[in-house]
Amino acid sequence: MVGPDPRRDRGRYDAFNRLLIGYGWLGNPLFLLGLTTLAICELRRPWLGLPRWIAWVGAIASVLSWGHGIGSATGLYFLEPLIFANIPAFLWLGYVGLAIARAAPEGATS
């Protein structure tokens, strides 16, 4: 056999499978929690200086992004189309990243 042998390296395969399950079931809600927290904090107390309407877009899109996962987990399948709320949420997160990068002082990458 050329590649790794799953019978010999059982511990490695089990560890990898646990990582997949952890990132699939725990990683997405943790990411959404962070995204929602960031959006609501920017809405309540602007620290990045984003326009108010962009802060609202981020807060609404991040809250709606929870709908798909909640719909899948609870059987409320009518919430499944809310997966499309991820698009403006990720665009908002990219804009926030750009705003943070612009706010960094010149030469701070050393």
Image (cartoon, rainbow, N blue to C red):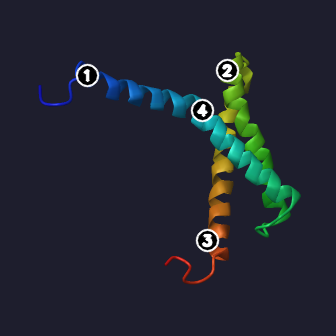
- Front position among marks 3 and 1: 1
Alpha carbon of mark 3 to alpha carbon of mark 2: how far?
36 Å
The circle drawn on residue 6 is 1
- Residue 42: image x %, image y %? 80, 59
The circle drawn on residue 61 is none
Alpha carbon of mark 2 to alpha carbon of mark 4: how far?
13 Å
Q: Do the residues labelled 3 and 1 touch (CB within 8 Å)?
A: no
Q: In which quarter of the image is residue 27?
A: top right
Alpha carbon of mark 4 to alpha carbon of mark 3: how far?
28 Å
- Front position among marks 1 and 2: 1
**Residue at 63%, 81% in the rendered image:** 105
Query: First in sequence: mark 4 or mark 3?
Result: 4
Q: Mark 2 is on which residue type?
A: Ala
Query: First in sequence: mark 3 or mark 1?
Result: 1
Q: Mark 4 is on which residue type?
A: Leu
Query: First in sequence: mark 3 or mark 2?
Result: 2
- Residue 1: image x %, image y %? 11, 25
Q: In the displayed image of the protein, which residue is found farthest to the bottom?
A: 106
